[in-house]
Image: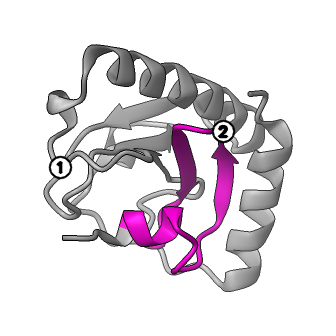
Amino acid sequence: MTSIFTKIIQRALPAHIVAEDEHHIAFLDIRPITLGHTLVVPKQATDVFFELEDAALSSLMLFAKKVAKALQQTIPCLRVGVAVVGLEVPHAHLHLVPLNGPHDIDFKATKLTLPEEALQKTATQIRAAVVL
């Protein structure tokens, strides 16, 4: 089954992409829990995060580190949190969430509704700060 993430990778669906290389892609969550909430996804579809091959997992984390540094520079926050949930989309992925307190990574919290212009501006700022 093709996931929504595969469709984004194939450009069949739009996304606010903030970073991409041959093996990974990072884009803003469309239902963020904080401003800048970003999903980091391997391009190779694997359903369960910890079923990624060791090299792919290491590579994904190093890519995520670069995106997290850009988030830290762009979004006012104390830290960037990381979460692996993996229940909502059957494609391995990480959530990078700008944090100013532990409550900022509560997935039960009301999701933000951001105007398209705000998402575009945020993506542009993060993209400009990513060093691959």
Secondary element at image label 1: loop
Closer to the chain start, of discs 1 and 2, is 1
Q: Mark 2 and mark 1 in contact (Cβ < 8 Å)?
A: no
Q: Residues within 10 Å of mark 2 (few under 14, many from 20)?
A: many
* Viewer-closest of 82 and 132: 132
Mark 1 belongs to which amino acid?
Answer: Asp
Residue 124 occupies quadrant: bottom right
Between 38 and 110, the one nearer to me in the picture = 38
Q: Is residue 7 above or below residue 75?
A: below
Q: Who's the residue at 39% across and 64% down the image?
A: 6
Q: Quadrant of the N terminus?
A: bottom left
Q: Is residue 64 magenta?
A: no
Determine whether 48 is above or below 114 in the image. Answer: above
Question: Which of label 1 and label 2 is nearer to you?
Answer: 1
Residue 22 among those drawn in magenta: yes
Q: Is residue 69 left or right of residue 131?
A: left
Residue occupying the point 64% across, 26% down: 66
Crowding around mark 1 (Cα neighbors within 10 Å: few <14, some 14 to 19, many 20+) is some
**Which disc is residue 71 wearing?**
2
Disc sitting over residue 76 in the figure: none
Does dot 2 land on a helix, a strand or a loop?
A: helix
Furthest residue in direction bottom, as rendered: 115
**121 or 34, which is in the foreground?**
121
The correct choice, above or below, for 35 with respect to 44 in the image is below
Quadrant of the image occupied by residue 82: top left
Measuring from the top left, give residue 55's x and y in whole percent.
Answer: 36, 15
Residue 117 relative to residue 67: left or right: right
Residue visible at 76% across and 42% down?
74
Gap between marks 1 and 2 measured at Cα? 26 Å
Disc 1 target residue = 47
Find the magenta span and give its range. 5-31
